[in-house]
Image: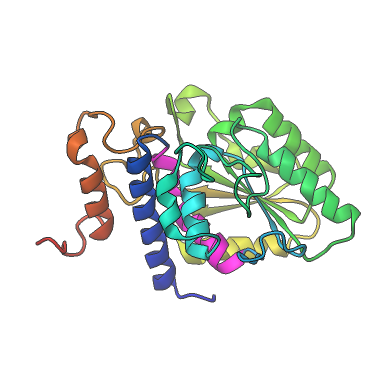
């Protein structure tokens, strides 16, 4: 590892705090998924991904595709911390004319490989890139595609999975945010996905399941995917929706709103939600003393 586990944890915590600040400044956006994927994004951009932030079109870079574009606050915050642009620009999220659109827009921001908004398209895009690398005999570059679990309720997702398995795209790794929530409730209530891993395996994929908040497990899974030569890899990252802010955790009601928009039963009043969320992150949900005490 280039960074220690502690260093990665600190980076991820800073990213989570920036996510809250961005969402509050924008007054809209998605909290739960953005927070829960901060550890996986940190591991990807600070330990695994081949890229040059000051040369975003570097021909030998890996390709990173975000299929579930609604969690772009975590993508933007990670890119800023990785050096693509100043962290001060994060506060322009969703504002008129910004490069940081509400869903990633490829032509707006250097470093984005795709435009994403409609769910279910990312694996198709990533599979096309991976096949292109194969056709050009480029063996160093990989394609990494992050997806939500909920978008696996869409048929075109499975068409792409079938295509990648058929073509043995061993240079493609899909990471699924298995947080078990979507905007209308729990995935297993809305449209059950289990047995999830077995479905990918049936389409000729290698499947790894990890704790999406354990850096050693995440990085080991990424490294293992590089060693699979006969098929694509799916990493199912089991995450906690809203990770880091205890009153958001496991709660689908925080899927699509930022702090400060509405009162939610059992949670802090909307007037203090943002302050409370940042306090939880700064103190690791009360595990360390607050700087205000």
Residue 184 seen in render = yes
Q: Quadrant of the C terminus?
A: bottom left
Residue 212 in view of the camera: no
Q: Is residue 35 magenta?
A: yes
In this picture, is 113 found above or below 263?
below
- Viewer-proximal residue, 75 or 197? 75
**Quarter assignment of residue 272:** top left
Specify the segment rendered in magenta.
30-48
**Residue drawn 62% across the image and 61% down it:** 222
Res. 122 image quadrant: top right
Q: Quick one: 22 or 183, which is closer to the camera?
A: 22
Occupied quadrant, residue 194: top right
Q: Is residue 264 left or right of residue 182?
A: left
- Residue found at x 43% / y 59%: 87
Q: Position of residue 147 (x, y in %)?
A: 59, 42
Q: Is residue 136 magenta?
A: no
In the image: residue 52, left or right of residue 170? left
In the image, residue 14 lies at what x, y percent?
Answer: 37, 60
Q: Main secondary structure of the magenta part?
A: helix
């Amino acid at each position: 590892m280039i960074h220690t586990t502690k260093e990665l944890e600190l980076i991820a915590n800073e990213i989570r705090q920036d996510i809250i600040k961005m969402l509050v400044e924008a007054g809209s956006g998605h909290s739960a998924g953005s927070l829960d994927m901060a550890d996986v994004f940190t591991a990807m951009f600070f330990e695994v991904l081949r890229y040059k932030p000051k040369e975003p079109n570097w021909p030998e870079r890996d390709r990173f595709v975000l299929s579930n574009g609604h969690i772009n606050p975590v993508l933007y915050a990670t890119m800023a911390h990785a050096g693509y642009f100043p962290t001060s620009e994060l506060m322009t999220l969703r504002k008129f004319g910004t490069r940081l659109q509400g869903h990633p827009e490829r032509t707006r921001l250097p470093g984005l490989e795709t435009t994403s908004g409609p769910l279910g398209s990312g694996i198709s895009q990533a599979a096309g890139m991976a096949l292109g690398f194969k056709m050009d005999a480029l063996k160093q570059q990989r394609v990494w595609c992050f997806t939500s679990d909920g978008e696996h309720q869409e048929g075109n997702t499975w068409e792409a999975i079938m295509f990648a398995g058929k073509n043995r795209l061993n240079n493609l790794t899909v990471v699924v945010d298995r947080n078990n929530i979507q905007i209308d409730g729990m995935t297993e209530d809305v449209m059950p996905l289990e047995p999830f891993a077995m479905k990918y395996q049936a389409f000729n994929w290698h499947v790894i399941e990890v704790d999406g908040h354990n850096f050693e497990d995440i990085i080991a899974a990424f490294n293992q995917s590089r060693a699979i030569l006969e098929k694509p890899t799916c990493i199912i990252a089991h995450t906690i929706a809203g990770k880091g802010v205890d009153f958001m955790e496991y709660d689908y009601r925080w899927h699509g709103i930022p702090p400060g928009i509405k009162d939610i039963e059992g949670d802090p009043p909307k007037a203090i939600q943002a302050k409370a969320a940042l306090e939880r992150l700064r103190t690791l949900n009360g595990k360390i003393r607050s700087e205000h005490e």
